[in-house]
Image (cartoon, helix red, strand yellow):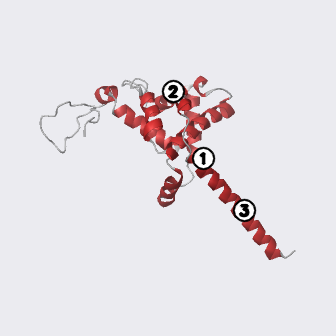
Amino acid sequence: MNRRNVIKSFFLYGLAAAAMGSVFELLYLNQSIDKGYVRSKKALITALAELIIPATDTPGATDANVADYIIHAVMEQLSTKDANNFVAGLHEVEEVAQKKMNKDFLQCSVKEQTEVLLIVRKNHAFFRRPLIKKIDRKLRGTSFFESLKELTVVGFCSSEVGATAALRYDFIPTEYKPCIPLEKNQPGWATK
């Protein structure tokens, strides 16, 4: 056999394999999500949100009931790609906890849970360049960790507990002041 033909065939087979993997991933990302599965993982979502905004001297994500907001957002507001990435991320968190810690994620200590979440985050940090990251987000949607962070922060800051206890909330501002300096140890404003 001719060496050029062998090289061409290897190249074509490799290209075909890569294309098939991409096609299957795009088909998976565009299927509808299992809403029952998302609802059944409320305890897992609560634990993940609490890792992002833990309760300290201010209330945490659990106190603000952020898990209900995240579940609603995943089922009703996120795009199909983003929702499927979120569900796949929940599966991945459970798998990594089983492989690395030999127990369920919810049975792990906070330190072990943080370690698992950092491993999952690292698994999805492929692209460092902004342009390639933007193209990847357009094709495959937002990653699990980015969605989890964003939904947790938005859910917390828009909750009553987050807006009143963790942030400074002025229900009826009396006058418009475009730039207000923060006082020492003052939390950020809850209103824009």
Label 1: which residue? Answer: 28
Q: Which residue is mark 2?
A: 42
Q: Which label's residue is closer to the chain start, 2 or 1?
A: 1
Label 1 Cα crowd, 10 Å radius (few <14 / some 14-19 / many 20+): some
Residue shown at 47% from the left, 36% from the top: 75
Q: Which mark is residue 38?
A: none
In the image, what residue occupies the spot 64% across and 51% down? 24
Question: Which residue is farthest front?
Answer: 32
User: Residue 34 appears at what percent x and percent y?
Assistant: 56, 35
Residue under label 3 = 14
The C terminus - image quarter: top left
Amino acid type, residue under disc 3 in the picture = Gly
Q: CA distance from mark 3 to mark 1?
A: 21 Å
**Occupied quadrant, residue 64:** top left
Q: Please say if the residues under marks 3 and 1 sit with CB atoms less than 8 Å apart.
A: no
Gap in Å between the C-alphas at discs 2 and 1? 23 Å
Residues tagged 3 and 2 counted as in contact (Cβ below 8 A): no
Q: Quadrant of residue 120?
A: top right
Q: Position of residue 105 (x, y in %)?
A: 60, 28
Mark 3 and mark 2: Cα distance apart in space: 41 Å
Q: Residue at x 19, y 41 (%)?
A: 180
Is residue 10 shown above or below 188?
Answer: below
Circle 3 Cα neighbour tier, 10 Å, few/some/many (<14 / 14–19 / ≥20): few
Secondary structure beneath label 3? helix
Image depth: mark 3 or mark 1 in front: 1
Tag 1, which secondary structure? helix
